[in-house]
Structures are given as C-alpha cells and as structure tokens.
Image (cartoon, grey):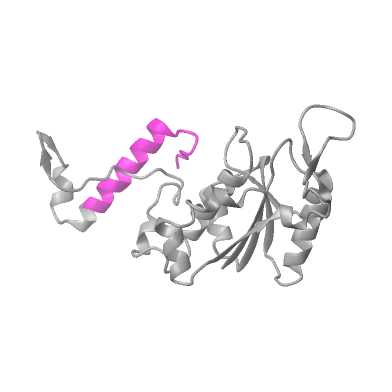
Amino acid sequence: MRLDILTIFPEMFEGAFSLSIIKRAQTKGLVDIHIANIRDYATNKHKRVDDYPYGGGSGMVMMIEPIALCIEHLQSKTSYDEIIFMSPDGKLLDQKAANNLSTCRNLMILCGHYKGIDERIREKYITREISIGNYVLSGGELAAAVLTDSIIRLIPGVLNDETSALSDSFQDDMISAPVYTRPADYKGMKVPEILLSGNDKEIYQWRQNKALERTKARRPDLFIED
C-alpha cells in the first residue's frame, strides 16, 4: 500500500511512524508512507497557506491553491482509491471502515488545520471524510496517525501473528474478553483455571461468553441480541 499524507506539520508524524508496527510494516516493504508538506506548494513569497475567512468571523482558513496544487501533483503520478479528509463532521471511524481501507492500494489523507480548509477542496477532491470522535483537535495530524495505525496493522504480513488482528475488539461487533499472562498467581490474584486447562474448545467458549458479558456491560450500544 502507498499512503500519502498532506500536512503543514510533517514533523508531527516522525515519532508515530518510526516505531512499533508502522515501522515494521515499512521495513518489510508492505506500506510506503510519504508525507507531503502543503507549504511547499504555496506560491506566495512567505509560503503562507492560510487567510481570513470571507464573510468575517474568527480563525483562519487553509487556502485552496496550495492544497489543490499538492493533490494534483500527487494525482499526476498515482491513482488513489480514496482521498480522505480528517474532519470532525466526517463519518466516525470504526473497525469496518478500517478493514475496508486496508484492502486499498493507494490512499491519500489530508490534514486540516486552523478553522478548516476552503470548502472547494472538499467539493472537488475529497472522496471520503472521517472523524475519530465527537471532539475537536487542533489539526488533523493526530487523527491521521490514528487512522493510519488502524489500517496498517490489518495488512497481511504486518503482524507476526496474523490471527491477532482478527480477534481484536470490534472485529465481531464485540469488545475483547479479558486476557492474562504469567505468572498464573500474583499475590493471590489468580488466572481463571479454564485458561490453564488446555481445552481449546472450552477456552474459546469462555472467551466468547466473557466478550459478550463485557460488551453488554460496557458498550451496550454495540450489543445486538438475537
């Protein structure tokens, strides 16, 4: 997969993309991440990318020209399955969306900032708008990093144990069952005996039951009873 991220703060991705699973995916050649600095496409003397909103009001708006030039330059070299804008009024990111996007070959993610981007960019270029929650961030960079992580970990070969992603919370519309590791007894706090039994069938059923219980108790909005 090729992933192009458009931003005015490229440095914000340096730490997030140089560690753990995302770094592993790049090292294995399973994903090719490029960070495009929108300021590089500004045509004015001071590389300005924002201006006051027409009609008045507070805040600044990202200008159409540098974003459009950046998008069109990338489109001249690559055909994108989706051009995504990280926006608080986009569709809320969920596991189903991450699964869908993980099958794409080329993705572009635009990070807004300030009061937002010129609406004409959304009308002409954006194919999908995504939000990571019902709150406002200073910019789209952190949201883009969250989206990127949720997608990349699903690409075959990224995780050492590919079945791990299939058992994540939300894959089956439930949150995960509790998990334990060594020691089996820590200061009297013991791991459930069933997990030490070696009976795969009973362990599977225990995990299903616990996942169902947790979903009903903690995320009833996800629970769909037959």
- Name of the residue lying farthest toward the top: 57
User: Closest to the observer: 153 or 221?
Assistant: 153
Q: List x then y, in percent, for residue 141.
A: 60, 46
In the rendered image, residue 225 lying in the magenta stretch gets the answer yes
- Name of the residue lying farthest toward the right: 55
Q: Is residue 61 something one can see in this rendering? A: yes
In the rendered image, residue 218 lying in the magenta stretch gets the answer yes
Q: List x then y, in percent, for residue 138.
A: 63, 36
Seen at 63% across and 66% down, the residue is 106
> To which quarter of the image does residue 25 belong?
bottom left
> To which quarter of the image does residue 77 belong?
bottom right
Q: Is residue 14 above or below residue 28?
A: above
Q: List x then y, in percent, for residue 93.
A: 57, 46
Q: Is residue 127 something one can see in this rendering? A: no
Q: Is residue 2 above or below residue 166?
A: below
Could you tell me which quadrant the C terminus lies in?
A: top left
Q: List x then y, in percent, for residue 160.
A: 34, 65
* Left or right: 210 as drawn, with respect to 155: left
User: Closest to the observer: 130 or 175?
Assistant: 130
* Left or right: 153 as drawn, with respect to 164: right
Seen at 40% across and 56% down, the residue is 20
> To which quarter of the image does residue 1 belong?
bottom right
Q: Which residues are magenta?
A: 203-226
Seen at 36% across and 45% down, the residue is 176
Seen at 78% across and 39% down, the residue is 61
Labels in figure, total: 0
SS majority, magenta: helix
